[in-house]
Amino acid sequence: MSSLTAQVQQKIFFSSATFLPSDSSFTVFYAYSIGYNQLVFEKKDESYYAALNISLEILDDKNSLVKRLFDSKQLTVKNYEETNDASKQINGLINFQLPEGKYSIQTIITDLNSKRELKPRPDSVVIKRGKIFQPLVIGKSIECGQTKYPGFINLGGSVPFTDDPIDLIIPILGNGIETIKVAVLNNGEEVYHSEVKDKFVSTLTLELCNEEIIVKTTDKHLKTTNFIVKNINEKLGEGMVQLTVEAGGEKKIFSQYVVWLNKPFSLTNTESAIKSLKYIEDKKAIDKMLDNDEEMYSSILKEYWKKYDPTPSTKFNPLMGEYYGRVDYAAKNFKPIDQPTGINTDRAKTYIKYGKPLKVERYSNGSGKVVETWHYENPGRKFIFVDKEGTGNYILQNG
């Protein structure tokens, strides 16, 4: 994993400043998100409560204060597990007007339960009138009222590594532009080069609806011609992306990153990841994979999983992600008190191979030992584990 990819994955706060032309200036949409697992929750009655304040200071290129803006968020969840869910984020959006110029957006996030302050690296924004504007990264549709709208993906300008369809909307200012040229380099390799004709003319705006950020169109203010690049992520692997857009005699290059959010920790070391195949693969095949230069491990592992990929049209392999997600879960949740990890326990082997059981029964047997019975529906199986030593190392009795 490159150092920049690791930095993006480890970020606990994502922000992006998207600017679009207005009648006499520019509208800046400052989108932010922070994971549930980064907030401090307090229990109130049967729920868990978190709250935070957001403070923005916009400074010009002379370091003079231009604007100061505020936002606040409150969040209530029903169970403790949800407070640690890394896949869920609280989102916010702050809109403001700015003229052309160079700006720095400095953010302070205050967790109201812990009183902790977080000061992420400032966002730099260069607003300059031209034809080509920053592409919007679009994900699944989000229902707002009775209408579905494109969902805006806020990863600080990055593109998520996923098999879910990801589109780009590229706003172009100017009349009579019927086509644009788009080229994409992924880690130095050209993966897309095409003339794009699919478009619509409207004023774009971002709004917050049901705690999700959506892209809406209006007839107010200055309209742009918005070109659509469908399924841009199909051929994108993790790493650097360089997007080149040509329109109306103008050319602009945008540098972004493709990031696997919540990537299983067990995939950060490819040698260990290959060894973790022992639950579904024989030792001879694993030894053959390891009998190569370490620099080849990553490509060998991807090649191994390619034959099991349920979505071969995309670079992302959801089955591989699911498997190593199970490895992570097993290592953390089945750890005996006298071992550093739970990865080699009987419960881990069963969980990694069969996944989460439909039902788990936990009780004491006639000898006072704790027993867990795992039930699976498809295929219909039952596994019985006993904690014989009282250390949390449950031994498989039958299954």
Image: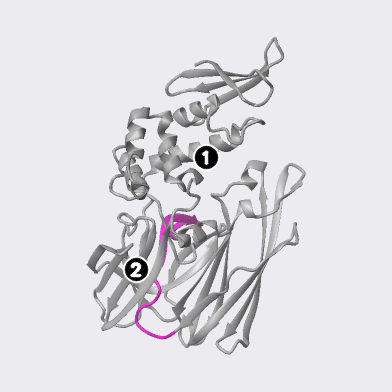
The residue where tag 2 is placed is 242
For badge 2, the amino acid type reads Gln
Q: Tell me the magenta residue range.
A: 128-150
For badge 1, the amino acid type reads Asp
The residue where tag 1 is placed is 328
Residue 60 on image: x %, y %: 57, 86
Task: Work out whether residue 203 or residue 120 is closer to the camera in this orientation and state it.
Answer: 120
Horizontal side of residue 177 vs 222, given as left or right = left
Q: Report the Cα–Cα distance between label 2 and label 1.
A: 32 Å
Residue 239 located within the stretch drawn in magenta? no
* Quadrant the N terminus occupies: bottom left
Horizontal side of residue 184 vs 57, given as left or right = left
**Residue at the spot x=43%, y=72% of the render?**
204
Residue 73 on image: x %, y %: 66, 61
Which residue occupies the extreme right position in the image? 45
Residue 141 on image: x %, y %: 43, 55
Q: Is residue 308 above or below residue 56?
A: above
**Residue at the spot x=46%, y=28% of the render?**
354
Residue 131 located within the stretch drawn in magenta? yes
In the rendered image, which quarter is residue 139 located in?
Answer: bottom left
Task: Work out whether residue 30 or residue 244 is closer to the camera in this orientation and state it.
Answer: 244
**Label 1 packing within 10 angstroms: few (<14), some (14-19), many (20+):** many
SS state under label 1:
helix
**Residue at the spot x=57%, y=55% of the render?**
89
